Amino acid sequence: MNEPSVDRIHSALRIEGERFFIIDQTLLPFKVEFLEIKGSRDAAAAIQEMKVRGAPMIAVTAAQALYLEMKSAVENGTVKNTDDFLSKLKETADFLNSTRPTAVNLSNAMRQIVKDVELMARNGSGCEENDLLEKTKQASEQIKQSDIQTCRQIGELGASLIPHNARLLTHCNTGALATAGIGTAIGAFYTANNQGKDITVFAGETRPLLQGARLTAWELDSSGIRTVLFTDNMAAYIMKTEKIDLVMVGADRIAANGDTANKIGTLGLAILALHYNIPFYVCAPTTTLDAGTASGEDIIIENRHPDEVRYLRGNLITAQNIPVINPAFDVTPAGLITSIVLETGIYSRPYSFS
Amino acid sequence: MNEPSVDRIHSALRIEGERFFIIDQTLLPFKVEFLEIKGSRDAAAAIQEMKVRGAPMIAVTAAQALYLEMKSAVENGTVKNTDDFLSKLKETADFLNSTRPTAVNLSNAMRQIVKDVELMARNGSGCEENDLLEKTKQASEQIKQSDIQTCRQIGELGASLIPHNARLLTHCNTGALATAGIGTAIGAFYTANNQGKDITVFAGETRPLLQGARLTAWELDSSGIRTVLFTDNMAAYIMKTEKIDLVMVGADRIAANGDTANKIGTLGLAILALHYNIPFYVCAPTTTLDAGTASGEDIIIENRHPDEVRYLRGNLITAQNIPVINPAFDVTPAGLITSIVLETGIYSRPYSFS
């Protein structure tokens, strides 16, 4: 079996013993610089400034930071017993969870770790803060390992939808830089490529922060996959003239009915794909599912600072103080999505993931 | 009657006696710098480098340059008689016409001037190069005056489609910087604004060269019209959430069947507008009509240098040498266009302009 090798791929993280580093993605592809995450404050800043991004990778970073924060607290004696531990764990998880509102993987990861540790505290007689810390470590590590395994499975399933000589269109970055593994939609591209399918990926640059131009084009090109970069407004032209076989993107939150929040621009691509009768696939881990949200109408869309649109790499690109709209995400209705690829299978309308 | 005052609006050109200057639009909005066009070589460079742009304004610039080129030739004695004059006039018109392939106003203007001068040469007994030069001047001036008048008429007709408190979406720049007058689609916005309609314009930034961010947002904001800038991939989100009343754009070439070439991204907006049931209007002078081209399939799309996508204001925004696609225009099928506003009237499907 040709399993994609993550070694050939730029990873978003580096582990040294118990030290945890992330690539500062705001500097890519011009500088590959790792940033140490020592605790929750480092993680929150890195997430908010989008030095680390991608719904799964945000969750992995927060999980590791949660453990490191608890480790410091136990080591420096501010946490002395089980009650202290649980109280600080929940507080820190809540703080990390508040860093970005739209992606749900983050809150799912925080909830999972707190649940695992609480369960141990409730069941284990005489268990101390050191035991709970060990449990936090395991639960955090589990988030990461599970993400790696999940990416592999999504990659396999996603690749099964990709024909030989496929011409693929994608948006934003859903690769090794967005996850702890090979990625979701881009994971499927890596897998198809390793299966010997000769693929070409058309990558939208993804304004305002250019994750497509800075991350996806660089990541795919570095790993030897034929990549063509385009500005987002060329998508219709490309669908019309470049014989695109399918569109494949990631997700930040999938509501119970299949409505999907993803990077701004995804909704437009889905509408264009429908117009040109091109299949439109969403690839994501089950941690992106939000069963508690009935439909996309209930998903909170993060609005980011206008200067992200007004400036590019520190340079003003418009008249100063021009009013700007800057939603980080949009919601694609389930009706526009051909299939959703989770690690558990390929789902079609009407969506029901249970 | 509240006619829009061009004085309040940044004009793309300046005339001093017989000297002709254009704003260097590649420097806007950071620097307002005028560049003198002394002849055809200056004009060709300015057009190719997009220091002057907008289909009507390109035609006006080439017309003025054609006259100035002929004036120099007559003055320095390289053109000594009627035959010399006609030969150089045609050669220069052809040269100017070759600078950009997609917009048709340019070739219509060159053809018109050559035709007027040839007619005089054929009919006028004993007419000399100085008479032909005077005719060239008149014909060039006529292109400019006609553009100003045409913009006014398009503005009136376009404004009749704009309701009170309208929320409008546009693309690229079709204003005073794209024409010798108040513009086409933006001319309609100026006119509606002067009629006391309280309008809000959502302006797409228009990658790669950011005419929306650099020119439209600046031009509209400077003239007191409420403007919201967005990155091109936000268009679907805005149509879905911002109660857009209509989309209004310009055109670079309109085929006989109504298929319309315009700035890359227009096609996508038309498909999104159809999806959201929002009227989609094209505003253009009749000089944009190309009766000789049956449909959009026959329109040649200019592909520009990949570095326009790879770099922004001199800064690389992706990995160097990433393959790039960079069509300057796309073609919107007539079926997606609600109406086409020319100075002669508002046309609807099936389009027939004769």
Image (spheres, coloured by chain):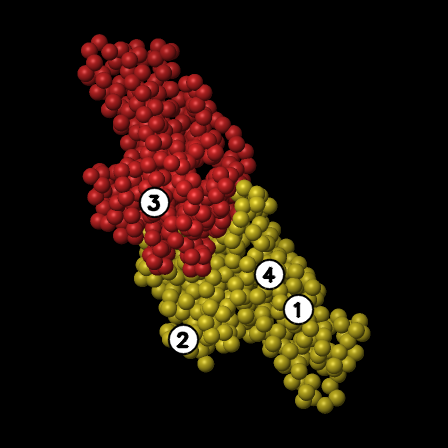
Chain colours: A red, B yellow
Q: Chain of mark 1?
A: B
Quarter of the figure with residue B84: bottom right
Amino acid at pointer 4? Val
The residue to which callout 4 is attached is B52
Q: Give the alpha-carbon distance from disc 1 to disc 2, as whole Å.
A: 32 Å
Tell me the residue at 34%/18% (across/down). Answer: A70
User: Residues at badges 4 and 3 in contact (C-beta under 8 Å)?
Assistant: no
Q: Does dot 3 land on a helix, a strand or a loop?
A: loop
Which marked residue is nearer to the observer: mark 2 or mark 3? 3
The residue to which callout 1 is attached is B95
Question: Mark 3 Cα within 10 Å, few/some/many (few <14, many 20+)?
Answer: few
Quarter of the figure with residue A101: top left
Evaluate whether label 1 is on the same chain as label 2: yes
Q: Does dot 2 land on a helix, a strand or a loop?
A: loop
State the residue in front, A181 or A207. A181
Residue A160 circle label: 3
State the residue in front, A353 or A303. A353
Tell me the residue at 74%/81% (across/down). Answer: B83
Evaluate whether label 1 is on the same chain as label 3: no
Q: Give the alpha-carbon distance from disc 1 to disc 4, as whole Å.
A: 17 Å
